[in-house]
Amino acid sequence: DAGVIQSPRHEVTEMGQEVTLRCKPISGHDYLFWYRQTMMRGLELLIYFNNNVPIDDSGMPEDRFSAKMPNASFSTLKIQPSEPRDSAVYFCASSFDRGLNEQYFGPGTRLTVT
Amino acid sequence: GEDVEQSLFLSVREGDSSVINCTYTDSSSTYLYWYKQEPGAGLQLLTYIFSNMDMKQDQRLTVLLNKKDKHLSLRIADTQTGDSAIYFCAESIGAGGGNKLTFGTGTQLKVEL
């Protein structure tokens, strides 16, 4: 398996623009997580899904952020409109629903909003 | 709330041992984890310990768990420059939490020659 795949790896956009980040989890994994990492706030869980259903979105900062998982192999995180304070590295991770519950992280998308 | 705390930085000389400490909050955690993040990459599971264990050794890595004090540590023996990274401890949030983990703030380990 290729692991968790995220695209794009880097995104530079202007304030006010819509940004869509994409994630393909590892095949067969039941859970999918979106995290944001910044120097100031560290690693924050934004939202996670179980079997494509959003379970906990309490970490989503505000209504400008939305996430979807239309099927087991694809998820998106959308920011509309984007703001400079959204600049961060966004990670997607997936895991099995059994045993060790190890989370497998993607390489991340580095977002810069100017 | 759930706070997992770590010191932010640790600097050691190559060949020395490194000890990274963590305090966690949820006494019902089943597993406790150490993840490693290398520059420009995502987190990767380094090792873990089951909550009914006190110690786990895996090659150069030793994990110690003190459940009474909710204290977790990671010791890296013979630290190498390739060990320079950010290390995160994490706990599962207990029953009903699914696979959700609470991560610490991360400790940046710098290995000097």
Image (tube, coloured by chain):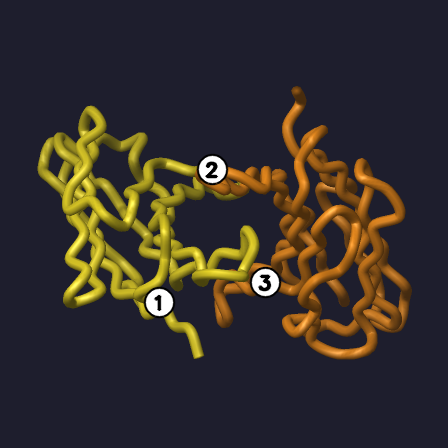
Chain colours: A orange, B yellow
Mark nearer the viewer, 3 or 1: 1
Report whether residue A61 is seen.
yes
> In terms of sequence position, does the residue under pointer 3 or pointer 2 come before the other?
3
Packing grade of label 1 (10 A; few <14, some 14-19, many >=20) is some
3 and 1 marks in contact (CB < 8 Å): no
Can residue B7 be seen? no
* Subunit of label 2: A
Amino acid under label 3? Leu
Q: CA distance from mark 3 to mark 1?
A: 17 Å
* Pointer 3 residue: A45
Contact between marks 3 and 2 (CB within 8 A): the answer is no
Instruction: Indicate the secondary structure of the residue bearing disc 1.
Output: loop
Locate residue A81: give its quadrant: bottom right
Kindly report the distance in space between the C-alpha atoms of the residues bearing marks 2 and 1: 19 Å
Residue at label 2? A99
- Give the mark count: 3
Q: Quadrant of the C terminus of chain A?
A: bottom right
State the residue position of label 1: B26
